[in-house]
Amino acid sequence: MVDAQTHQPISGVKVKRVVPNQDPDVDQARKGGQLMEKTRAVQSGPDGTFVVDSERDLELFGGLGWVGVTFSFQHAGYATFTTNYTIVNATNTPSGEPLVKAGDILLTPLSK
């Protein structure tokens, strides 16, 4: 995470995996399995880097492999930024975990 104007690292950026339909409707209470699905946010470190653990899902019908992930980035004083990464952006670590080298993610300061 870096400031789009100064290119300085930004510490404390809230990084969250975006999952479609994650938040229930007002009239629907979440069930146990749905509560466990909710992803937790991580924060960028002093050097602007972050690590989000990979998640695995079991699907009865569908292909195997990594398809993609969408993240939102939030920090006070900056515009929220959302982007997605696909298999094109990824590789695997020697242990087989997916690894995305996102490069510099530029956050735009809000005008004062």
Image: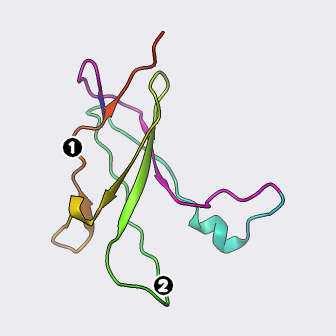
Look at mark 2 in the image and give the residue it sits on: 59
How far across and down, in percent of the image, does residue 32 sit? 70, 72
Crowd class of label 1 (few under 14; some 14 to 19; many from 20; radius 10 Å): few
Real-space CA distance between mark 1 and mark 2, rounded to the nearest whole angstrom:
31 Å
Specify the quadrant of the image occupied by residue 6: top left
Q: Residue at x 27, y 70 (%)?
A: 97
Q: Amino acid at mark 1?
A: Gly
Q: Mark 1 near mark 2, Cβ–Cβ under 8 Å?
A: no
Using the image as rendered, state which of residue 34 and residue 72 is in the foreground.
72
Counting residues from the start of the chain, the first of labels 1 and 2 encountered is: 2
How far across and down, in percent of the image, does residue 63 sit? 37, 84
Using the image as rendered, state which of residue 62 and residue 92 is in the foreground.
62
Query: What is the total number of numbered labels drawn onto the structure image?
Result: 2
Helix, strand or loop for disc 1: loop
Q: Residue furthest right?
A: 27
Specify the quadrant of the image occupied by residue 85: bottom left
Look at mark 1 in the image and give the residue it sits on: 103
Instruction: Provide the residue span drawn in magenta.
Output: 3-26
38 relative to 110, above or below: below
Secondary structure of the magenta portion, mostly? Answer: loop
How far across and down, in percent of the image, does residue 54 sit? 37, 65
10 relative to 20, above or below: above
Its colouring scheme is rainbow
Q: Residue at x 41, y 35 (%)?
A: 13
13 drawn magenta: yes
Q: Which mark is residue 5?
A: none
Q: Quadrant of the N terminus?
A: top left
Q: Residue furthest left?
A: 94
